[in-house]
Amino acid sequence: MKYISSSAADIKQHYDVVVIGSGYGGSIAASRMSRAGKKVCLLEKGKEFQPGDYPKSNLEAAKEVQLDLCGNHIGPSTGLYDFRVNDDISVAMGCGLGGTSLVNASVSVLPEPRVFEDKCWPEELRNDMQSFNDGVKHAREMLGPVEYPEEEKGYPKLPKLEAMRKAADKINAKCYKLNINVTFEDWVNRSGVKQAKCVLCGDCVTGCNYASKNTALMNYLPDAVNHGAEIYTKILVRYIRKTGDLWSVHFQMYDTDRENFDTAEMVVKADIVILAAGSLGSTEILLRSNKMGLSLSGKLGDRFSGNGDTTGIGYNNDQKINGVGLGYHKPGDGVELPGPTITAVIDLRNQDKLDEGIVIEEGVIPGAMAKLLPHAFVPMSRLFGKDTDSGMVDFVKEKWRELVSLTRGAYHGAIKNTITYLVNTHDGAGGKMKLENDRLRVDWPGVGKQPIFDKIDEKLKDVTSALGGTKIKNPVWNKILDYDLITVHPLGGCVMADSAENGVVNHKGELFTSDNGTDVHKGLYVCDGAVVPRSLGANPLLTISALAERCCKLIAKDNGWVIDYNFF
């Protein structure tokens, strides 16, 4: 595959638009602003990966892990797997050209319509949902979400999908296939990128090595380059300040020898700056900018949400699941194929109270972890597990399957019959982000003690019982660890609102200039998950993408530009 980023030595002094970050928001901004004929520069902290570059083994994956702790940073600062460890709720996200789209399950769904009736959203958006729906349309055209083509195009039934249907039937719930941004046929997409059909390896969340997952690197980013955008990687933006009529973006380049950003500070200027470094990244840059003199709303850092994320395990079920990715194995090596990481949902939304809605999706554990699983899950099942069925015959069968896994590995026995649950709900968006010693921290005492997480735990027991397995709790959600959580869907921090009294940006993504009123900094925007003012209760990528599309359309309108959405 052709690499699309340029050498940092080529960064010019001035651009019409500088975009910070390259996830869904940043890639959309770069594409749309360049399609409007603007001179665009995109700055990304992480490296550029192309299919074939992603880790396949646990040793390869370990080299791409970075841990940001309270007083220390472990691992390379451009590591693909970026873990932000906090006392109450930690965050796992992607670091690379394409952002978290590189390492997510690419589920493209929308929240319940009631989510957008919440008055935390700006009135201009609530009264103009057509503009949001237009954004959804544009995003779907680029990201290409489709359902898993079960028993079509040569694709088989998947045991994990069958297990979800069986469990849903037993608990009298809806189960259906989800739209996922995955390609199931060979083609050259509209951005000119050659993509191969999905091989069902299951390693979506460690990085797709087959060019089958429709990450931002497969569509929006090459589209931006096709229209003249310049992309630079391994660039850490520190802060932004106003210099005359222009915005100055202060950044550092990556020091390869030290594996950190410890080089001299540099500056690039722009008429318009669009922050899209994610909930944590955009908030951190603005908190630092505020300390450097940029006047912003006092709500900056507030209303952090983990989107109600939690997980669970249905271990050693009575039926086959195939819930581990291939890792270094290749299709045809004799390992049964798991399928895309997520294909279906047990939908427990549509409750009387919006915030009691739950979605349960099945997952695939990355193949890079396969060797560790048998020896990890046996003690976990003893410490955090509860068997949901009984009887001596069942007991003997379970012990035999455990022995098979321990002797033959994760693609056999108990682990072969293990399903992962990935859950979204609503969490109240009560987190607070702040800088401590120039490092971003997330505070949210008691987040995991909310009653909804007990309800989820009980529901996962019911689902596992339908499959005859042992329900294992999320290992960090326990009394010893004070019921901490981990999220892969961070939202908020720069939330949109009607005025600065309630948020950080307006419905267009423009930043408020003070603690009150509606005055904004012209030419300074946030265009990513940081603007979302509440949990969504469903995978957020499509909502974030639609909001970003809407933001770009409004930027163009306000400046008299025309975005060309056509393909030839």
Image (cartoon, helix red, strand yellow):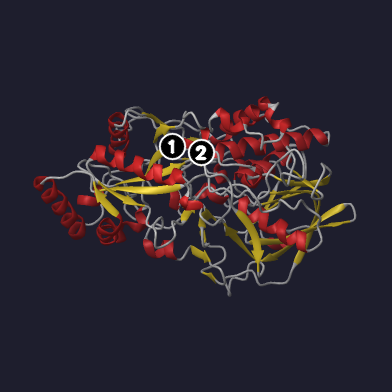
Between 139 and 544, the one nearer to me in the picture: 544
The three-letter code of the residue at mark 1 reads Val
Residue 419 appears left or right of 543: left
From where the camera sits, is residue 226 visible?
A: no
Residue 5 appears left or right of 53: right
Residue 351 appears left or right of 155: right
How far is disc 1 from disc 2 in space, using C-alphas?
A: 7 Å
Residue drawn at x 31%, y 51% as measured from the top left: 472
Rendered view: 406 above or below 102: below
- 1 or 2: tag closer to the N-terminus: 1
Label 1, secondary structure: give it.
Answer: strand
The three-letter code of the residue at mark 2 reads Gly
**Would you name the residue on which mark 1 appears?**
359
Q: Position of residue 382 (x, y in %)?
A: 25, 58
**Considering the image in quadrants, where does the C terminus appear?**
top right
Rendered view: 102 above or below 118: below
Label 2, secondary structure: give it.
Answer: loop
Q: Quadrant of residue 550?
A: top right
Q: Position of residue 500 (x, y in %)?
A: 77, 45
Residue 552 appears left or right of 426: right
Residue drawn at x 34%, y 56% as measured from the top left: 328
Residue drawn at x 44%, y 49% as measured from the top left: 205
Q: Position of residue 240 (x, y in %)?
A: 77, 58
Q: Quadrant of residue 552?
A: top right
- Pointers 1 and 2 in contact (C-beta within 8 Å): yes
Q: Position of residue 403 (x, y in %)?
A: 16, 57
Residue furthest out toward the right: 244
From where the camera sits, is residue 400 visible?
A: yes
Residue drawn at x 36%, y 48% as measured from the top left: 312
Q: How many marks?
A: 2
**Would you name the residue on which mark 2 appears?**
537
